[in-house]
Amino acid sequence: MAAAARPIISFVSLIILAGGILLQFFTILSGGINSSPENQFYFLEASNIDNIPGARNPSRWTFFAICGVGENGHNANCGSPVPALPFDPPRNFGTQQNVPDQFIGTHKFFYLSRFMFAFYLIALFFAVVALFTGLLALCSRLGGYLAGLTVSVALFFQTLTAALMTAWTVQGRNAFRSNNQSAKLGVKLYAFTWAAMACFLISTVLFCCGGALGRDSGSGVRRNRSTRSNRSVNRGSFFDTESQRKVKDDYS
């Protein structure tokens, strides 16, 4: 039963892991692709910022670009894609005029967003590696443990990514609002980022459970066999000893 259940659990783990990777791709491609559904995703939107020279009103921060908003509510008029685009309004807008004071004279938001982008790519790399190693989990316990280890690394970096994203987007939203400007969080990218983390967590647990299946039953069978063989040997030794004693008694 355990041997039959292992590939089923591993297959379910692979499906959940693939779902997490798909959510990662939706997030990472935002701002780099202007077609649907990617043009619906963003981390943070700031509006009522027409008093900031050079700023799109509204402005949306995505993974690769700062975008405006079209008539249909989707991302539009996106800037050139920038790898590891930092969230730093004075740098993004090229001015400090009417920019919230919380963004001026600090590099906190710059580093929070930059590390988030880096950790996101690292998490994606280990998740893809785990997807291939997870194929070994379909046929072996060692493959299950190996896949579980790889996914756990992706889970670690994805958790850091989600925490950093939450930190800079929430603090950025509050900073804009404190400056009498409107701001809101991108619900979809929030859901994708945290859901990917949940997928990796579930996949890690399932891969490890698949690796553990059959261990106790197999060792129990071996213990039972060794116990039976020892009993047989002991019984044979007992009978041999009794027969030898009887022979000795007869001759004496």
Image: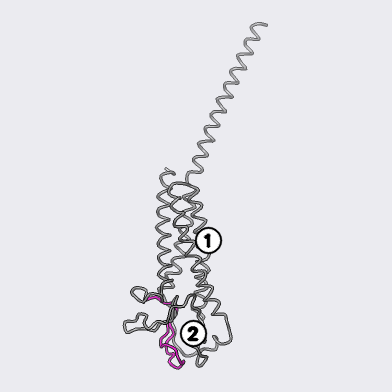
Q: Dot 1, how many residues are within 10 Å of its Cα: few (below 14), some (14-19), or many (20+)?
A: some
Identify the mark nearer the N-term, 1 or 2: 2
Is 42 magenta? The answer is yes
Q: Position of residue 116 (x, y in %)?
A: 51, 72
Q: Identify the residue at image location x=45%, y=54%.
A: 134
Q: Which residues are magenta?
A: 39-59
Q: From the top left corner, tell me how far across and down residue 173 is, in percent.
A: 48, 82
Quarter of the image for the N terminus: give it. top left
Q: Which residue is mark 1?
A: 153
Circle 2 — which element? Answer: helix
Q: Quadrant of residue 235?
A: top right
Magenta span has 114? no
Residue 209 in percent (x, y) is at 48, 51
Q: What kind of secondary structure does the magenta stretch mostly adopt?
A: loop
- For residue 195, above or below residue 9: below
Residue 92, above or below 9: below
Q: Amino acid at mark 1?
A: Val
The secondary element bearing badge 1 is classed as helix
- The label shown at residue 8 is none
The disc at residue 92 is: 2
